[in-house]
Amino acid sequence: MSKIEAMAILKQKQELRRGGLLAVREAGGEDEVRAQDKPHGNDIMDWLSQNNGRLEVFEQRWLLGVNRWSLIFAASPPLWTEMRKFTVRTLREFGFGKIYTMHSVIITEVNLLADEFRKKIKSDNGVVKFRNTFSLSVLNVLWCMVAGIRYEHDDPRLLKLMGHIFNMSKSVTFGNPLELMLPFTKKFAPWLLKANLRNKVFDSCHELSKTLIEERKAEGFYLSGPQNYIDVFLKKIHDHRDNNETVYTEQQLQAMLADLLMVGSLTLNATLNYGILFLTLNPEIQKKCQNEIDSIVPRHNAPTVDDIEKMPYFQAFMLEMHRCANVVPNPVPRLVPKDWNLRGYRIPKDTVILTNHYSVNTDEKIWGDPRVFRPERFINEKGEFVPDPRVVVFGFGKRICIGINLVNSIVPLFLGSLLQQFNFSVVPGTEPPSPEPEIGVSLSPQEFPCQLIQRESPNKIPV
């Protein structure tokens, strides 16, 4: 590279930095661009979707094994596109977008969790330590969604999978600074990145996925009348059995199940824990949510998605919770497939692209008081809920996270049902819990104690 070319590139990077909208840095010899506002984020993700900007967090064949791909980490654009399309369509058909078919499953899990809380009220003065509190419950909902079955919370398979997921949360960090700044470490010093633990966790989860698949194959419903996600995928495998180039393989199905069960349960557990944390830290907000829920839903009934849509303040609470929690602050990075001009800035081929939810959701220029938990910012003068499109929860651009429907149904139904039954408060004689997060595969609250008090309500909400 000539001196003139080097100076031109340096000038380009300085201009990007001065814009304040894109952050640029050299990561171990690799250029990286981080979008830090929503317009740039939308432009970037839409362009990459149209131009097959492939995902790159780790080298996939090194991390997951030869020919073992997934939805979250897939590096092959055609495969990722096909798997995303299939997953969205199939989950919508079997409950993902038709939440009423999943309502009884969710409320069953809420009731079981509420029973455990009531035991704590009797034995430990209602003090519950929140960390993996929701993990088994949401994992069971996801399991039911993909396999059509649920397990008791003491089932060895459920507990084993939960243990693997917890280990993964500690072994994988998206946007690991060491990995981004010194990418060669993932090949030559994997122990620095806990890569061996990662591989063990992924292998174990794939083995459990394989067991699920074998059980569904033995049932035989996938050929005559598919009943869930696994069945539909198995039918695809059968229909494409003579195509050597097909992406529909049992290895791919194992990877997809690992994605859905692991990443889904981690992010849902973290989000629900944040909900309880913010309710605990803001008792006046908690009371407003409870009053609104009580005014809409009879105390002997569980709230439904239709009920939630009639609750402007509770919806505002939910959006403020997502804004402040930032459970996924930096989604999976992408790689620019060809030279690109973004709003007057030249971005070379093979530049790493990251979008930054956190910087948007905590921008003082947008929110004024971003560190203050204030649902009223989404309520207008008429008392109506007005969502702000500047909040980034499920990604930038048109192809947002496929989990949007799942989160928008499971989380409010869990929190709404629990608010009907319990008050959540700081444990007397202790300091309020810190909202500072633990960093792993997602952001989650540090373990915190909370005192639960039973509200006057039926012992169990009918399913």
Image (cartoon, grey):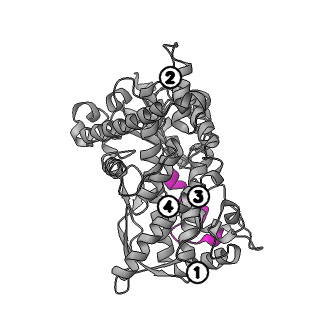
- Helix, strand or loop at label 1? It is helix
Q: CA distance from mark 3 to mark 4?
A: 9 Å
Residue 65 position within the rendered picture, expressed as x and y whole percent measured from the top left: 33, 28
> Which comes sooner in the sequence, label 2 or label 4?
4
Left or right for 127, reference 228: left
Up the image or down, 243 lies above or below 430; here it is above
Q: Label 1 neighbourhood size at 10 Å, few (<14), some (14-19), many (20+)?
A: some
Question: Which residue is pictured at 27% across the width and 39% down the height?
Answer: 200
Residue 120 position within the rendered picture, expressed as x and y whole percent measured from the top left: 38, 76
158 within the magenta span: no
- Helix, strand or loop at label 4? It is helix
Name the residue beneath numbered marker 1: 287
Q: Comparing marks 4 and 1, which lies closer to the viewer?
A: 4
Residues 458 and 441: in front is 458
Q: Quadrant of the C terminus?
A: bottom right
Q: CA distance from mark 1 to mark 3?
A: 26 Å
Q: CA distance from mark 4 to mark 1?
A: 24 Å
361 within the magenta span: yes
Name the residue beneath numbered marker 2: 247
Question: Which residue is pictured at 34% across the width and 52% down the height?
Answer: 159
Instruction: Please report the bounds of the magenta region as a residue range.
Output: 357-377
Q: CA distance from mark 2 to mark 4?
A: 34 Å
Name the residue beneath numbered marker 3: 104
Residue 47 position within the rendered picture, expressed as x and y whole percent measured from the top left: 61, 33
Q: CA distance from mark 1 to mark 2?
A: 51 Å
Name the residue beneath numbered marker 4: 109
